[in-house]
Structures are given as structure tokens and as C-alpha cells.
Amino acid sequence: MADSEGPTPAGGSASPGGAPSSGGPSHSGESPFGGGWWTGSGDSIWASTGVNLAAVIMVITGIAGIVEGIAGIAGGDVFAKVGKYAFKLDVTAWGWIHLIIGILLLLAGIAVYGGARWARMLAVVLTGLSIVANFLALPYQPLWSIVAIGLGVFVIWALFSVPDRQESRS
């Protein structure tokens, strides 16, 4: 924002036309939390908000996957006992799968919040893998698997619903 635009009300910023805005993130590409995600106007503000929410969901799901993985590797009665199941793996194997996917989701969520396009594409792939892993783990953790699948579907939708930065600025 240039100094020639004058003062703005209560922490708000001036829009390109000089009119005060609602105090939200400016069009400079910075989020209110210091991230670099582009926040446009109109319908695109909803899409960019969805991407920021998707990044947060990825971080939280990644942390949950890490905890879930550690619990599976450590053993015990954290996972349900399963009878005959086509994709039956040792609980330790499921633990390693969830730990690795959880770490990757956590890192990808942080990168998505940073605004990197490659991170969005990687996040779609990793979230897809997470959905598949949680589908295969349904007999072991039915409730969490269903929740994680739903969150994953939202994340993929949000990542595809925002326009690319370069397309939006031209």
C-alpha cells in the first residue's frame, strides 16, 4: 500500500481504488497469518479461504496420522481386531503406512499454506493416497477412517477450486 493513499479506518487497508477495505488481507499475496497464499476478491476469496482451510486440515490430519502411526508401530490394542479381510496387514505395517503419509501430509500442508503451486499438486496426490489408505483401514478404525476420507475429499475439492496465481493476476 502506498503512503499517498492516506489513513485507513481501524487497521483496515485501502483497496486499489483508495476506498477502505474490511480490514482483511490485502491483494499483496499475504494472508493475515503471514503465509503467502494469494487472496483475491469476490468468488476467488472463498476459494483461497478454502485452500487455507485445506492446508490447516492437512496439517491436523498429518499430525493425527503421525500419532496413529506411532500407536500402530508401538502395538497394543489401539486398532480393532479384524477377522478375514482381503487387505489385512500387520498392525505395525499399517502404523508405518499412516506414519509416512502423516509426515508427508503435514509437510505438504505447510507448503500449500506457503502458496507453492507444486505443493498443491503434491497435496492432491498425497491426499488421494491418504483417502485410499483410510479406505483400506476401515475395518481397523471405522469412525476415524470415514472422517479422514471426508476431510480428504474436501481438501482435494478446495485445492482444485482456486485459480492459479499466474492466471488470476493477468
Image (cartoon, rainbow, N blue to C red):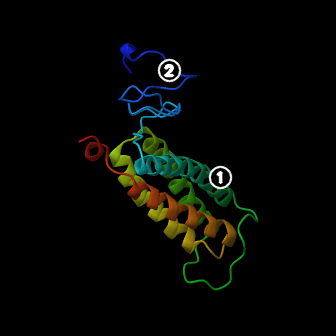
The image quarter in which residue 82 lies = bottom right
Q: Which disc is residue 135 wearing?
A: none
User: Residue most toward the left?
Assistant: 170
Q: Residue 98 placed where, x, y %?
A: 56, 59
**Going 40% across and 57% down the picture, which residue do you hit?**
161
Q: Is residue 74 visible?
A: yes
Quadrant, the N terminus: top left
Q: Identify the amino acid type marked 2.
A: Thr
Q: Is residue 93 visible?
A: no
Q: Residue 40 placed where, x, y %?
A: 39, 42
Q: Are marks 1 and 2 in contact (CB under 8 Å)?
A: no
Relative placement, left or right, of 170 versus 52 is left
CA gap between label 1 and label 2 equals 46 Å
Relative placement, left or right, of 2 versus 98 is left
**Going 41% across and 43% down the picture, which residue do you hit?**
41
**Going 72% across and 75% down the picture, which residue do you hit?**
81
Residue matched to label 2: 8
Q: Nearer the viewer, residue 102 or 4?
A: 4
Q: Secondary structure at mark 2?
A: loop
**Closer mark to the observer between disc 1 and disc 2:** 2
Q: Secondary structure at mark 1?
A: helix
User: Residue most toward the bottom?
Assistant: 84
Relative placement, left or right, of 164 versus 98 is left
Mark 1 neighbour density, 10 Å: few (under 14) some (14–19) many (20 or more): some
Q: Nearer the viewer, residue 162 or 12?
A: 12
Residue matched to label 1: 67
User: Residue most toward the right?
Assistant: 77
